[in-house]
Image (spheres, helix red, strand yellow):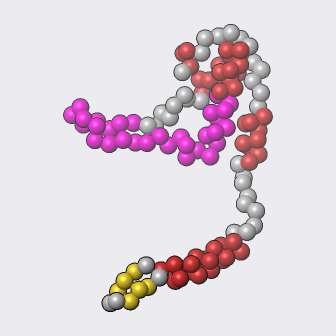
């Protein structure tokens, strides 16, 4: 509620019809099924099974444990800025992390290796 010159204006009465009209327009416009061109690649990465020690080591070394782009910007020993991790912007981030996890699990469970060097 907004008061101007002793008059009360109820904002929801004015805003709600506009929101409903806008939502109805977007539902009609975007009601079609979204096309995800990376879905086949996501499924392929999720279905990939690790059955070879050499391949598991390759995957564990190839995919980093943490984002390599995250940095603190220091000037004269003080932090003046921070670059956030940008790996989560990668559309295949979850699938790649899952693949790395499966590779590390294979190395520990099947091969009995110590994975401390990969972390």
- 52 left or right, relative to 26: right
Q: Residue 116 in the image: x percent, y percent?
A: 55, 15
Q: Which of 79 and 64 is in front in this view?
A: 79
Regarding residue 4, the answer to whether it shows in the image is: yes
Q: Name the residue rendered at 57%, 78% in the picture.
A: 16
Exactly how many numbered labels are in the figure? 0
Q: Is residue 61 magenta?
A: no
Q: Does the magenta stretch include residue 94?
A: yes
**Could you say which quadrant of the image residue 71 lies in?**
top left
Which range is magenta? Answer: 71-100
Q: In this view, does 57 lie above or below 86?
A: above
**Could you say which quadrant of the image residue 36 lies in?**
bottom right
Q: Quadrant of the C terminus?
A: top right
Q: Which of 69 and 8 is in front in this view?
A: 8
Residue that protrudes farthest toward the left in the picture: 76
Q: Name the residue rendered at 55%, 29% in the picture.
A: 64
Q: Which of 119 and 25 is in front in this view?
A: 25
Q: In this view, does 3 lie above or below 36?
A: below
- 29 left or right, relative to 14: right
Q: Name the residue rendered at 62%, 23% in the picture.
A: 60
Q: Residue 24 in the image: x percent, y percent?
A: 67, 76
Q: In this view, does 27 lie above or below 40?
A: below
Q: Name the residue rendered at 73%, 69% in the picture.
A: 31
Q: Residue 66 in the image: x percent, y percent?
A: 51, 31
């Amino acid at each position: 509620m907004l008061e101007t010159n002793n008059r009360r204006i109820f904002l929801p009465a004015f805003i709600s019809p506009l929101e409903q009209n806008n939502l109805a327009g977007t539902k009609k416009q975007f009601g079609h099924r979204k096309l995800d061109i990376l879905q086949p690649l996501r499924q392929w990465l999720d279905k990939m099974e690790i059955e070879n020690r050499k391949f598991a080591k390759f995957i564990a070394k190839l995919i980093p444990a943490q984002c390599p782009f995250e940095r603190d910007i220091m000037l004269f020993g003080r932090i003046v800025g921070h670059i956030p991790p940008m790996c989560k912007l990668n559309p295949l981030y979850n699938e790649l992390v899952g693949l790395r996890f499966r590779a590390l699990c294979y190395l520990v469970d099947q091969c009995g290796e110590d994975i401390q060097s990969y972390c």
